[in-house]
Image (cartoon, rainbow, N blue to C red):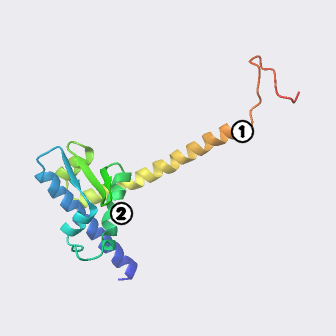
Amino acid sequence: MTTSENLMMDTKKVKILILQMLKDMVLNAKGQLITFRPAKVAQDISIWTRKSPRSESVIVRNFLEELVELGLIRVIKRSARGKVYGIMRNTEFWLILEHNNVHEILSFIDGYKTVRRNNTSINMLRELSAAQKIAQPQTATNGGDKNISGNP
C-alpha cells in the first residue's frame, strides 16, 4: 500500500471514529444541543493525548469544518481555545446520526459533498453569466427609447 493510500485509509478511519463518537453523544443526549471541541474529540477517539502536539488533530478539525460547510453542524462559539461545534436536536444531521450506522453516514456525507460541489459549480456559472450581462455596456435612454448618451 502506498503512502497516499495509507493516509486515505487513516483519514477514513478517523472520520468513522468521529462519526461514531458523535452518534454516541446524540444517543446519550438529554438536552437539545450537544457541543464539542476538536481537541476533545481527538482525545476521546485516542488520536492524541493532552501531552502530544495539537497538530495531530488537524484531520479532526478539517472534518468538522467540512461538516460546517455542508450545513450539518454549527459553530456555537469561538474563543482563544478554538471553536466549539454543536448539533441541535431534531436537525437533519441529528436524525441521520440517530438512525443510521457510521458507514452509511460517511457515504451520505461524501454524496452530499458531491451534490453540493456540482450545485456550486452550476450556481457559479449562473452568477458568472449574470455578471457578464450586467457588465455589458448599456445605452442610457430617456424613457422614450431615445439615446441620451453623447453618441447619436
Residue 110 visible (yes or no)? no
Which secondary structure, mark 1? loop
4 lies above or below 17? below
- Residue at image coords 24%, 74%: 48
Quadrant of the rendered image containing residue 101? bottom left
Image coordinates for residue 7, horizontal then vertical, percent: 35, 76
Q: Is residue 42 left or right of residue 69?
A: left
Q: Residue at x 28, y 59 (%)?
A: 106
Q: Is 124 rendered above or below residue 44? A: above
User: What kind of residue is marked 2?
Assistant: Asn
Q: CA distance from mark 1 to mark 2?
A: 41 Å
Q: Which residue is at the far right?
A: 152
Which amino acid type is shown beneath numbered disc 1?
Answer: Gln
> Picture coordinates of residue 119 (x, y %)?
46, 48
Residue 43 lies left or right of residue 109; in this view the side is left
Relative placement, left or right, of 111 versus 13 is: right
Q: Residue at x 38, y 81 (%)?
A: 3
What mark, if any, has residue 108 been given in the picture?
none
Residue denoted by label 2: 62
Of the residues tagged 1 and 2, which is closer to the observer?
2
